[in-house]
Amino acid sequence: MMTYDPIWDNFLFVVNDEDWKRLRAIISPTFSTGKLRKVKYYIDENIQLMSKHLDEKIANDPAVNMKQIVGGFTMDTIIQISMGIKIDSIQDPNNLIIQNAKKLFGQDISFQDLTTFALASAFPNLMEWMGRKIQPDALNFLANISKDIIKKKREEMKTKQQSQKGSNFIELVLEVEEEQKRILEQSGKPFKHINNDELIAQCVTFFTAGFDTTSSAILYATYLLASNPDKQEKLYESIIETLKKLAKERDDGCDNPYELITFESLNNFEYFNAAFNESMRSLTIVTFIERMATEDVRLETSDKKTWFDVKKGDIIRIPIIDLHNDPDNFYDPQKFIPERFLAENMSNPEKRFNKSAFLPFGSGPRKCVATNLAFIEAKIMLIHLFRLYRISLHSKTKLDFFVNFDSLIPRDIVMQVEKR
Ligand code: HEM
C-alpha cells in the first residue's frame, strides 16, 4: 500500500521484494541478543522507575490503572532504545516527544487517518494527487529528532577514532550498515546502503509496531494472572525458587534480582515462560497476518483429495486469533492453562497442542523482526512485577478492547495492587 509519504512508505512491514530484503538484512542484526545486551540496562532502569511510581500510587489507593503504569514503562523504554533519550512519561506527560509519539498509536488514531489508509489501499494515485498524509505533524517531529541523531552518528563515523559504540537503535543500524559494507566490499559484491528516509522510518516503527503490541502483551498477562490467583501464586513461588537457584550458581555471592534476571537466564523461568506463552495464545494481540501470492499455486492435502487454487496477486489471510482458539489445536482453549506450554505436556497426545498453530509473532521470513526485543522487554518487566507485587481483580476491573488495524488493544484497566 503506497501513501506517498517518505516515512510510511518505508516502514519494514510495508515495503516488499528487493527493498524489503535489503532493509530486513540491515535491521535484523540490530535485534540480535548481542546488541540487545546494551538495551537490558535501560529496561532494568525503567522497571525500577515503574516500581517507584507504583509504590507511590498504592500508598494512596491500591486500585491502579495498570494501562497507565505499563504504558509509561513501555513508552520510556521505546524512546530510550530507539533514540537514546531518557524520559519519565508518568512524571512528565506533557513532554513533546511523548505527545507526538502518542499520536501514532491506536488510541489517538483519527477518523481522518483511517480514511486515509482506506483511500491509500484502494486508490494510491489519488493519495499522491491530494497530497494527504497520515499524522504529518507527529511524523515530522519524530523524523527531525531522528535526523539529528543520524547526522551526529554519520559525522562521528567519518572520524572513526571518535565514534562511540552504538547505544540506541539508529546508531546500531548505522554500525550494522558499516559492518556489511566492509564485508561486501571485500567480497566484491555491490553494496546498497540505507538512506535517511528509510532509517527514520525504521526508527518510527518502534512507535507504530512496537508500543501497543509490547504494552498489550504485558497488560494481558497481568490481567490473566490477576484473574487466576492460584496460577499467580504458583508463578510467584517458581520465580523466587529460580532466583535462589541462579544466586547459588554464582560464585560472587550476588543475589540482586536485576543482575540475576538476564536475557540468558530467562530460559530458567520455566513456569513464567509457560504462563507468558499461554497469555499470548489466550488473548491474541495481532489477530491476523496476510501474504500475497507471487505466482499461481495449488495448495493441496497430502492425499491430494482436497485442494485450493491460489492465483498470483491473491491475498491470503491467516487468522491467528482463530487458530489460537480452535479446540482442534489446543484443548479447552477458553481456559487459561499455562501448564499446556510445559515441555512435558506439549508432547503428550492427550493434551492437544498444535505447535504450528501458535503464531503470536507470525511465521516465516516476515516473522516479527523484533521478537527478541519484545521478549526481553515484556518478560523481564513481568518477572519483576510479579516478584514484587500481588495483583488481583478489583470491583472496577473491566477488560475492554479497541481494534487498531490487525491488533486487539486493551483500554484503561483498573486492578488491585499490593506489595509482597
Ligand atoms: C509482544 C509484542 C509484539 C508482537 C505480538 C508482535 C507481533 C508481530 C506480528 C504478528 C508480525 C507479523 C509477522 C508476519 O507477518 O508473519 C510482526 C511484524 C513486525 N513487527 Fe512485531 N510484534 C511485537 C513487537 C514488536 C516490536 C517491539 C517492534 C519494533 C521495535 C516490532 C516490529 C515489527 C516489524 C518491523 C514487523 C514487520 C516485519 C517484516 O515485515 O519484515 N514488533 N510483529
Image: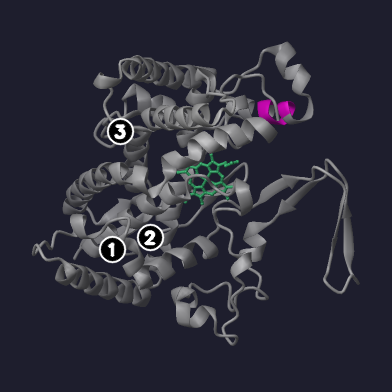
Residue 386 position within the rendered picture, expressed as x and y whole percent measured from the top left: 28, 63
Please indicate whether residue 158 sits to the left or right of residue 107 in the image.
Answer: left
* Residue closest to the eye, 33 or 162: 162
Q: Earlier in the sequence, mark 3 or mark 1?
A: 3
Say which residue appears at 29% left-offset and 62% top-offset: 265
Q: Which residue is mark 1?
A: 386
Q: Which mark is residue 167?
A: 3
Q: Are marks 2 and 3 in contact (CB under 8 Å)?
A: no
Please indicate whether residue 367 sits to the left or right of residue 183 in the image.
Answer: right
Say which residue appears at 66% left-offset and 62% top-offset: 322
Q: Is residue 411 visible?
A: no
Image quadrant of residue 95?
Answer: top left
Q: Eyeballing the image, is 361 above or below 158? A: below
Q: Is residue 367 visible?
A: yes
Amino acid identity at mark 3: Ser
Image quadrant of residue 142?
Answer: top left
State which quarter of the image contains the C terminus: bottom left
The kind of secondary structure element at disc 3 is loop
Q: Is mark 2 within 8 Å of ligand 1?
A: no
Please indicate whether residue 227 sits to the left or right of residue 6 in the image.
Answer: left
Residue 143 position within the rendered picture, expressed as x and y whole percent measured from the top left: 46, 19
Q: Which residues are magenta?
A: 116-120
